Amino acid sequence: MKSTIALANRFREIILNGTWVANTNYKDQLENLDWKIAVSKIDSLNTIALLAQHVHYFVNGIKNVFNGGNLEIRDKHSFDFSEIRSQSEWKYFLSKFWEDSEHLAKLIAQLPEEKLNQEFVDVKYGTYKRNIDGLIEHSYYHLGQIVLIKKIIVAKQGIKNKL
């Protein structure tokens, strides 16, 4: 199997359809989640919605480069999003997240093998492969947070329902 196809499959696994590494993925965790849970604030933790938007921000930024555009994303803006205020806004965001992720996966799969070791935009960002691997690893990191926050919210709701 080509390295680019393997990387695309690894990316799809964390966002859309896999269970091999974490036994879950973003789509599995978020698809049927009520928006009120997604925006629930637990102490100083980020919300589930904010973490998902954060990952989507990087997916979109890297996708833009793969489409021939500039690298326009910046870490300092990676948590700057409008608050989600309804189930329809949440569903719309999720549909964009899945669509953009699948589009990026296709672009990764179509990347010529020799491009993987080439500079990604600027030497300071490393290679295409490093950025794809970084996006996958970063996504796993935040997926773990989402799973834990979701468990905390569900546990707190269970306690309230028993009172």
Image (cartoon, helix red, strand yellow):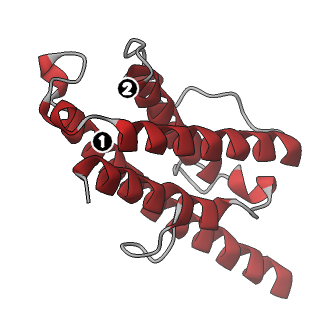
- Residue under the point 46% across and 74% down: 19
Q: Position of residue 94 (x, y in %)?
A: 69, 46
Is 42 left or right of 78, judged from the image as shown? right
Comparing 51 with 122, the one in front is 122
Q: Position of residue 9 (x, y in %)?
A: 40, 57
Which image quarter is the N terminus in? Answer: bottom left
Residue at the spot of label 1: 132
Q: Position of residue 106 (x, y in %)?
A: 47, 42
Q: Image height check: is 33 above or below 35?
A: below
Comparing 76 with 14, the one in front is 14
- Residue under the point 43% across and 36% down: 107
Marks 2 and 1, how far apart in space? 16 Å
Residue at the spot of label 2: 75
Q: Is residue 163 visible?
A: no
Kind of residue at badge 1: Ile
Which image quarter is the C terminus in? Answer: bottom right
Q: Is residue 127 visible?
A: yes
Label 1: how many Cα within 10 Å (few below 14, some 14–19, many 20+): many
Q: Are marks 2 and 1 in contact (CB under 8 Å)?
A: no
Is 46 left or right of 94, judged from the image as shown? left
Label 2: how many Cα within 10 Å (few below 14, some 14–19, many 20+): few
